[in-house]
Amino acid sequence: MRVLVTGANGMLGRDLCTHCVPDSIEIIPTDITGDVTRLDITNPGNVRSVIGDARPDVVIHCAAYTQVDQAETDPITAYRINALGAEIVAQETARAGGAMCCISTDFVFDGTAARPYHEYDMPNPLGVYAASKLAGELAVARHCPRHWIVRTAWLYGIHGRCFPAAILRAARSGKPLRVVADQCGSPTYTRDLAQALWSVIATPTYGTYHAVNAGQATWYEFACSVLREGGMPDAEITPIPGSDWPSPAKRPGFSVLTSVRPELSGRHPMRHWQAALSDYIKALGDAEAGLDAA
Ligand SMILES: NC(=O)c1ccc[n+]([C@@H]2O[C@H](COP(=O)([O-])OP(=O)(O)OC[C@H]3O[C@@H](n4cnc5c(N)ncnc54)[C@H](OP(=O)(O)O)[C@@H]3O)[C@@H](O)[C@H]2O)c1
């Protein structure tokens, strides 16, 4: 099966292209920059020629504008990439006879639920990034009939800026940490998500899926686990309310995801986020040791 990946140099894209790729898959990595096939998802001609030439069976769409706070002051760029870009990729994937797997976010929900959000809950995005991602979901559903929309959350991985890496960096520099303790979500390791995505696209059971590591945590609980796993259990860390950490974009207070339809794709539930975090910390250590040795 030929699988074209957009945003292949991003945090998720890089793990997707290298981690647990089934033998039967031939990957065509693309991104707007870097050492892969150049694909600007906002450029219809570019998208038509790259997807038309590659004729992939599936496009996994990881490319996105992911700067949640910056989106509030630059909504046009957020919508151009997350909504228009997804629409163009969906149109050209359908035209080339392929199916599309589009990665979306827990932020499509407003966070007022008293239980984890499942696939049939109603989105109600709070900020520009979230609204632009929801617009992308709707465009994909409209323009590419054979689609999977996979919502995930609180991603972290080896290849990119992410919360656990920032916590470790700050703790190593001896900075006292203040971390929000009243926002709760589903921390998810990109390598686990990559594995889940390979399993989702293996069957033509199209539709919307939630794919996150099991369990839930506040940012504060997540940070405490990072410090423990990272060998710094005594680092100074204080829980604070979100109101003490003002940010331009409103974020859902509770955006834990669950799935009521994993059996449709024959997927196993993903492991608990703490087990995934432990593997991430080991992989990060290996990557840092490799860099030191180089
Ligand atoms: N990170 C999270 O916590 C999180 C949570 C839930 C869902 N998601 C979703 O998961 C997906 C992957 O996220 P991620 O964290 O891996 O994102 P990321 O690291 O920001 O990667 C996105 C990639 O898309 C590329 N890109 C930007 N504009 C493009 C364009 N016009 N054409 C083609 N490529 C373009 C970026 O290139 P440049 O870097 O050069 O701009 C980057 O390589 C996204 O759909 C995101 O919305 C992420």
Image (spheres, grey):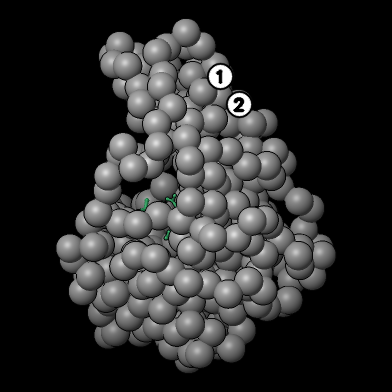
**Can I make out residue 3 in this image?**
no
Per the rendering, the mark at residue 229 is 1
Mark 2 secondary-structure assignment: helix
Residue at left 63%, top 37%? 273
Task: Specify the amino acid type for callout 1.
Answer: Glu
Quick one: label 2, few (<14), some, or many (20+) residues within 10 Å?
some
Q: Earlier in the sequence, mark 1 or mark 2?
A: 1
Ligand 1 falls in quadrant: bottom left
Q: Nearer the viewer, residue 54 or 233?
A: 233
Q: CA distance from mark 1 to mark 2?
A: 6 Å
Q: Position of residue 241 (x, y in %)?
A: 40, 37
x and y percentages locating residue 41 in the rendered image? 32, 73
Q: Does residue 99 appear in this view?
A: yes
Nearest the viewer among 230 and 55 is 230
Q: Which residue is mark 2?
A: 278
Report if the CB atoms under discs 1 and 2 are less than 8 Å apart.
yes
Q: Residue 58 location, x and y as percent?
A: 56, 73
